[in-house]
Image: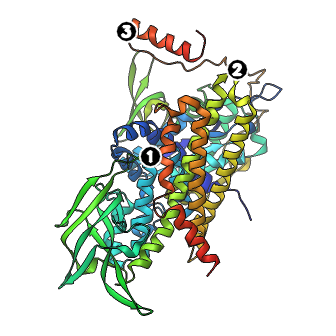
Amino acid sequence: MKIVVCIKQVPDTKNGVKFKPDGTLDRGAMASVMNPDDKAGLEAALRLKDLHGGEVTVVTMGLPKAEEVLREALAMGADQAILITDRVLGGADTWATSSTLAGAVRNLEYDLIITGRQAIDGDTAQVGPQLSEHLGIPVISYAQKIRVEGDCVIAERQFEDRYHVLKAKLPCLITALSELNEPRYMTPGGIFDAFDADITVWGRGDLKDVADTDIGLKGSPTQIAKASDKVKKGTGDMINGTPVESAAFIVEKLKERHVI
Amino acid sequence: MDFNLSKKHLLARSLFRQFAEKEAKPLAQETDETEIFPKSTVEKMAKNGFLGIPVPREYGGQGCDPLTYVMCVEELAKACAATAVIVSAHTSLCIDPILTYGSEAQKQKYIPDLASGKKLGAFGLTEAGAGTDAQGQQTKAVLDGDHWVINGSKCFITNGKEADVYVIIAVTGTVEKHGKKLKEISAFLVEKGTPGFSFGTKEKKMGIRGSSTYELIFTDCRIPKENLLGIQGKGFQIAMHTLDGGRIGIAAQALGIAEGAFDSTVKYVKERKQFGRSIGQFQNTQFQLADMATRIEAARLLVYKAAMAKATQKNYSVEAAMAKLYAAEAAMDVTTKAVQLHGGYGYIREYEVERMMRDAKITEIYEGTSEVQRMVISGNILK
C-alpha cells in the first residue's frame, strides 16, 4: 500500500504567538513543529503500513528549513521525503498550496493520501479537500478512525455530537484529526537514519500539470489584511470537590497570592 | 572548534525532552514518595530504543554515539533523576563492559535483549567493606570443573532487584606484584534466577528513591565457566574502565538535575512576589541565577567533552572524572541555591526542587566519590 502524507511545519504556539509590525506572523522568532493534525495523519499512515505493509512518503511545501519536519517524519518511520521549495511558490494561500501539492503528488504512485485536518497557523481546513478536488479523488474529512479493507478505506467522520462511518474506494484522500491517535515517538536510531537519508527536493519545474496562475502569491485569491493574537486566558485549575471544599481551595489560592 | 550541537543531536535532544516531560516528569514526585521503581516508564523507554542508544545496530541497538546517550540521561534527569540512573547503570555499567570485554558469543547472547530493553542490566562491584577501595573485595569466585562458584555479597546495587543480567566483580585468587601479594580480581556475568543468587535488603535512600537499590547475595552460586567476562585476573581494569564510562552517565545525570532545578527556579522567581515585586527583580536573585547558569554551562561543556572523548579516545578517565566531579558539585550547589530561592516553599515536598536537592547528593558519591575523582585527576597530573 502506497500512502502519501502531506505535512506542514508550523510555528510552535506553546510559548505564545509573535507578530511582525505589519501584522504577519514572525516565524523566525518562534520555534517550529510538525502541525499536530498532520502528525496524527502520519501516525495513521505508519499504523496502516505496520498492518498492511507498503510505503509512506511525506511531502511538504515550504522554505528549505521545512526539511526539519521531513527529517522528523523519517525518524518516526516514513520511507521517503519530498520537499517542495521554490521562491515562486512563496506567499501561497490554500488554493495555491493545494495546486502545488497536487502538482507534486501527480508524480507519485499512491493508494491513499492523508493530510491533517488543518494547520494551527492558518486554521482553514481547506488544503486537504482542495487537493482531492485537484486530483479528482474522493475525500473523507475530519477522520477520527481509519481502517482499510480490500480496496476500500472506512473512516469515522467526526461531527460535534456524532460521527458518520464512510466508505470510499481507493485511491482517496483523508483529512486527519489530532484525536485520531497518539503519535509515536521518534527513535534515537531513527533520527540517525533520518539524517543519513536523502530528501528529494522539487522546485516549480518538477510540478506536473499546474498553471503559473495557480501558484505562489500571484495564484492566491486570498490576501491577509491583518492577523492578531487571541486574548490569552490562564489555564485555570479544575476543582471537583464539594462546594465547601471548592470554596476552601479558592480561599487558599487567594491567600497564597496574598489577595486576601 | 564548534560548540553548537548538530541538527541531528538537536532533534535527538528534542525527542528526549519531549519524552521526559510527558512520561517521566508526571511520575517523578510519586516515584519519590512511594519509592516504587517506575516500571511503566522503563517499558516505554525500552519500546522507544532508549535502553540501547550507544549499542551498534548489529547487536540490536540504536547505533548512536555517546553524546546522544548522554543527552538522553541529561534530559531524563531534568524530570526524574531516578529514571535517569536506571538508564545510566543499565547502559554504562552492564552493556558497555559486555560490548568492550565480552566474547562474541557473550555479546550475541546478552546484548540484543539488553539493547531492546527486554532485559535490564546492573553492575556489582561495591561491598560493605569495599567501596572506593575496590581491592578490598571479599566476594570470591572459585573454579569447580565447568563452573565458577561465587560466594559473598554486593551492596548498594542500582537496578538491584529489577535487573536480569549482572556484571559481578569477584576475587579469583592472589597474584604477586612488586613483591606484594594482591588479590586477583575477575569479572563475571550472572543471570537473575541462578540458584544461589538472591537479594538482601532494599536500601532506603535520601534521594533517587524510585531507583531499585539492593544487596546481592551469592551463596554457592554456580555459573557456567564461559560466563567469565574478559580475561581472568583483569577484573579490576574492567571495573575501572567501566566506571570511566559510568561516570560520564552520572555526570549527565547531575547536569540534568541542576538544569531541572534551575528551570523550576527561573519560573518561580518570576511568579513569586515579595515587597510588591517579583523576587526575580532583586539583584541577589539575579546574581544567584547568573552563577547557577554559569556553573551549569561549564558542567555541560565538560560532560559533552567527556562524551566526545569516549567516542574518539581509548582513554578518557580524566575527562570523565573532571565531568563527574564538576557536574556533581554543580548539581549540589545549584539545587541548594534553588531551594534557598524558593524560601519556605523550597523545603516543602510539593515543590520539585526539594526532591532535586536530595537527588543531587548521590551524584557526589556513587560511581566514585568526588574525592576519588580528584585522585584520578591529580594522579594523571603527577604521574
Whichever of callouts 1 and 3 sits on the residue coming sooner in the sequence is 1
- Which residue is rendered at x = 17% and y = 85% of the image? B145
Q: Secondary structure at mark 2?
A: loop
* Mark 3 in CB contact with mark 2 (< 8 angstroms): no
The residue under label 3 is A242
Chain ID at mark 2: B
Residue B57 sits above or below residue A152 on the image:
below
Task: Identify the chain of the residue marked 1, using the numbered disc in the image.
Answer: A
Marks 1 and 3, how far apart at CA? 45 Å
Could you say which is closer to the camera, residue B91 or residue A163?
A: B91
Please state the chain letter of the residue tagged with numbered disc 3 in the rendered image: A
Q: Quadrant of residue A87?
A: top right
**Tag shown at residue B233:** none
Is residue B86 in sight in this rendering?
yes
Q: Amino acid at mark 1?
A: Leu
Local crowd size for mark 3, using a 10 Å CA cut-off: few (<14), some (14–19), many (≥20): few
Would you name the residue on which mark 2 appears?
B275
Asked which quadrant contains residue B168, the reply is bottom left
What's under tag 2, amino acid-wise?
Answer: Phe
Crowd around label 1: few <14 · some 14–19 · many ≥20 (10 Å)? many
Q: Which residue is mark 1?
A: A46
Q: Nearer the viewer, mark 3 or mark 2?
A: 2
Question: Nearer the viewer's eye, disc 2 or disc 1?
Answer: 2
Q: As drawn, which residue projects farthest toward the bottom?
A: B179
Give the answer, above or below, for where A9 lies relative to B301.
above
Residue drawn at point x = 43 percent, y = 37 percent: B29
* Residue sticking out furthest to the right: A21
Taking depth in this image into account, of B359 and A49 the one nearest to the observer is: B359
Alpha carbon of mark 2 to alpha carbon of mark 1: how far? 56 Å
Where residue B239 appears, x then y in whole percent? 42, 73
The crowd level at tag 2 (other Cα within 10 Å; few <14, some 14-19, many 20+) is few
